[in-house]
């Protein structure tokens, strides 16, 4: 029998709390992003009724329809997929936070569109810690420079960093990648860049979020464990 979404969500929240307490962290400092991409609006409504309040989407067109359908929900929407500059106009109107800024070109496009609606767009800079060509993100050695460049924009504010490690069957193998992102965030803080906050580290998914929590994750992006496998 299919496990209800509410029960799956409850179990994930329990595991987040347990892991946070085990490594001396406050569970309230770790936020769950329920990754609802490709899932119907009704699934999102069920998860929201069970306590999820941040949802992650990867595709602008799909997200726009879903957000319009679920206009009555008191939730936040985060964009977690690769974003093209020509979709910036839609992204700033739909999303509370964008996790995947990886270039000055994209940041400028978001800044321009956010200015039109008098919004300060919260973003995270995506870092390609693994160096995999199939993944988006700025190279670690170029991250501080990109943060400095984005900090000059008036309508974009960096709130932290995001990464996706390689897939491993053993989540402990992802630990060095999460640790490197945390260390990079510390370097950014030490650089004392204006208009910059390093309060968020978006890292960890269904298979490795507990390891990410050990290394300082504040946003964990979990889809499969809540909504089931994508069809």
Image (cartoon, helix red, strand yellow):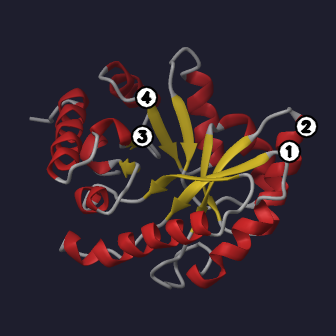
Quarter of the image that includes the N terminus: top left
Q: Name the residue under label 2.
A: 116
Q: In this view, does 69 lie above or below 208?
A: above
Percent from the top left, x then y, of residue 18?
15, 43
Where, by quadrant of the figure, is residue 64 drawn? top right
Neighbour tally class for label 2: few under 14, some 14-19, many 20 plus, Cα within 10 Å = few
Mark 2 or mark 3, which is nearer to you? Answer: 2
Q: What element carries label 4?
A: loop
Q: Name the residue under label 1.
A: 113
Alpha carbon of mark 2 to alpha carbon of mark 1: how far? 5 Å
Q: What element carries label 3?
A: loop
Q: In this view, does 127 lie above or below 85?
A: below
Frontmost residue, 126 versus 89:
126
From the viewer's perspective, tell me whether residue 175 is left or right of residue 182. Answer: left
Please name the residue shown 19% across and 54% down the image. 23
Mark 4 or mark 3, which is nearer to you? Answer: 4
Neighbour tally class for label 3: few under 14, some 14-19, many 20 plus, Cα within 10 Å = some
| Residue 53 disc label | 4
Please name the residue shown 56% across and 80% down the image. 140
Q: What element carries label 1?
A: helix
Q: Which badge, 1 or 3, is on the more N-terminal residue?
A: 3
Count of all numbered marks drawn on residues in the image: 4
User: Given contact means CB atoms under 8 Å apart, are the residues at marks 2 and 1 in contact?
Assistant: yes
Q: Which badge, 4 or 2, is on the more N-terminal residue?
A: 4
Neighbour tally class for label 1: few under 14, some 14-19, many 20 plus, Cα within 10 Å = many
Q: In this view, does 50 lie above or below 89?
A: above
Q: Which badge, 1 or 4, is on the more N-terminal residue?
A: 4
| Residue 39 disc label | 3
């Amino acid at each position: 029998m299919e496990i209800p979404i509410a029960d799956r969500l409850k179990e994930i929240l329990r595991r987040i709390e347990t892991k946070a307490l085990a490594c001396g962290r406050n569970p309230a400092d770790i936020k769950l992003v329920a990754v609802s991409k490709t899932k119907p609006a009704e699934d999102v409504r069920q998860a929201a009724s069970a306590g999820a309040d941040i949802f992650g989407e990867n595709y602008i067109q799909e997200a726009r329809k879903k957000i319009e359908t679920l206009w009555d929900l008191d939730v936040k929407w985060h964009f977690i997929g690769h974003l093209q500059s020509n979709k910036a106009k839609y992204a700033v109107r739909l999303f509370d936070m964008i996790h995947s800024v990886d270039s000055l070109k994209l940041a400028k496009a978001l800044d321009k569109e956010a200015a039109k609606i008098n919004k300060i767009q919260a973003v995270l800079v995506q870092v390609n810690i693994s160096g995999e060509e199939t993944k988006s993100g700025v190279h670690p050695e170029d991250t501080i420079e990109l943060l400095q460049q984005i900090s000059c924009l008036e309508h974009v504010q960096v709130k932290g960093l995001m990464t996706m490690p390689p897939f491993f069957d053993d989540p402990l193998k992802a630990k060095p990648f999460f640790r490197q992102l945390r260390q990079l965030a510390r370097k950014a803080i030490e650089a004392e860049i204006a208009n910059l906050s390093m309060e968020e580290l978006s890292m960890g998914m269904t298979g490795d979020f507990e390891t990410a929590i050990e290394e300082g994750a504040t946003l964990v992006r979990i889809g499969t464990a809540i909504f089931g496998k994508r069809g």
